[in-house]
Amino acid sequence: MKPFTFEAHIPRTVFGSGTLDKIPEEIERLGAQRVLLVTENTDRQRALADKVKGLLGDKVVGIWTIALAAIGLQLHEGSCTDAVMHTPEEVTLKALEQAKSVNADCYVSLGGGSTIGLGKALTIRTGGKHLAVPTTYAGSEATPVLGETVNKVKTTRSDPKILPNTIVYDVDLTLSLPQQLTYTSGINAMAHCVEALWSVGNNPVIDGIACSGIQDLASALRKLKDTPNDMDARGKATSGAFVAGVCLAHVPMAIHHKLCHTLGGSFGLPHSETHTVILPHAIAYNAKAAPEAMEKIKRALGTDKDAATGVYDLEKELGTVTSLKELGMKKEDLEKAAEIACKAQYPNPEPLEKGKLLQLLENAWEGKPPQSV
């Protein structure tokens, strides 16, 4: 018998189809009066921001949008721009100035991990409320974890104050998610579940939901490959992402997230794609040290192969990126990445050693099938 202590940290969660219309009610519930929207510079997200602004009316005091500052464009009075991957501190400080200038007391983040991360960064610095509206399957909206990049080094911290107050999942919003991002953000979420199974903080509560998350995400992604508009599959992927975030919220991270934070924060690799490439190799690294976790992953995937190969085969089936080389990583930077990953280590079943990590990264750079190192 393994003793454990479990304390749940889960935001108020509104889930369904058409739930975007519930945002005014949820903002009222939070007692917010001056809302800053945080979103992304795509046609899809700008349209979403405009819709939410229409729902909230005068309560919206500004919109902070990705990467429009370079061309000097403002969408609305009180609006400004910039939100990028891995939450660089300099971007957060610019957004913070804007938030203070409009006296915002609430942030509504619309989009994926970049916007939700910026919403978290603003919340922890100002004490404002935070309502997250995810449009991908990354799962970060359900965690009290904030990863920030300072001087090209990404570090993470966990604080209950970072956790959004409310999540609004509108499954309809995922129908326009690009197919490849559907897959990579789904596998990003799956990584949270996988890591929870071998985490030092694993317990029976998280164990059960992690397995269900892997199973739901794997089956949903396979279904969405053939029928992208299948609402049941979209719903299962969305709820699977929520479950994945809950897993990550309650256990310490390990090798997989350490490597992805290193590659993203120090080398600028894209978030969900990096998670997708690294996951099979991280599983292989821990295969001998965490056999029980491997068996659970294998069963949840429904594969007759080992856990690492099962994930790799799923990625091949979906046609996702499978190599760091495809993401623009330079081979000569792999050794530096291994060195960085060995600093401030996350607890992991198999100790993190530079030589082994370098071999893992070389395999991932080539896109080789996962293998023990």
Image: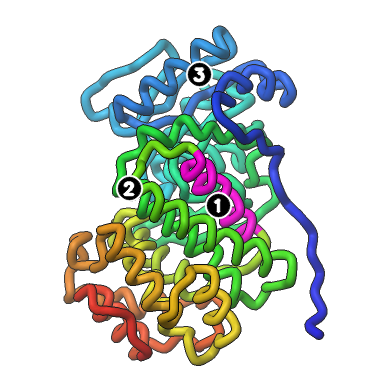
Q: Earlier in the sequence, mark 2 or mark 3?
A: 3
Q: Which residues are magenta?
A: 232-249
Q: Residue at x 38, y 74 (%)?
A: 280
Could you tell me which secondary element the residue under label 1 belongs to?
helix
Amino acid on which the number 1 mark rests in the picture: Gly
Q: Main secondary structure of the magenta part?
A: helix
Secondary element type, mark 3: helix
Q: Label for residue 344?
A: none
In the image, residue 295 lies at what x, y percent? 55, 81
Percent of width and height locating residue 191: 48, 64
First reached walking from the N terminus: tag 3 or tag 1: 3
* Percent coordinates x, y for residue 313 in the rendering: 33, 70
Q: Residue at x 58, y 19 (%)?
A: 21
Identified at 45% across, 40% down, the residue is 92
Q: Which residue is mark 1?
A: 240
Marks 2 and 1 sit apart, C-alpha to C-alpha, by: 19 Å
240 part of magenta stretch: yes
Give the quarter of the image for residue 269: bottom left
Residue that label 2 marks: 226
Crowding near pointer 2: few (<14 within 10 Å), some, many (20+)?
A: few
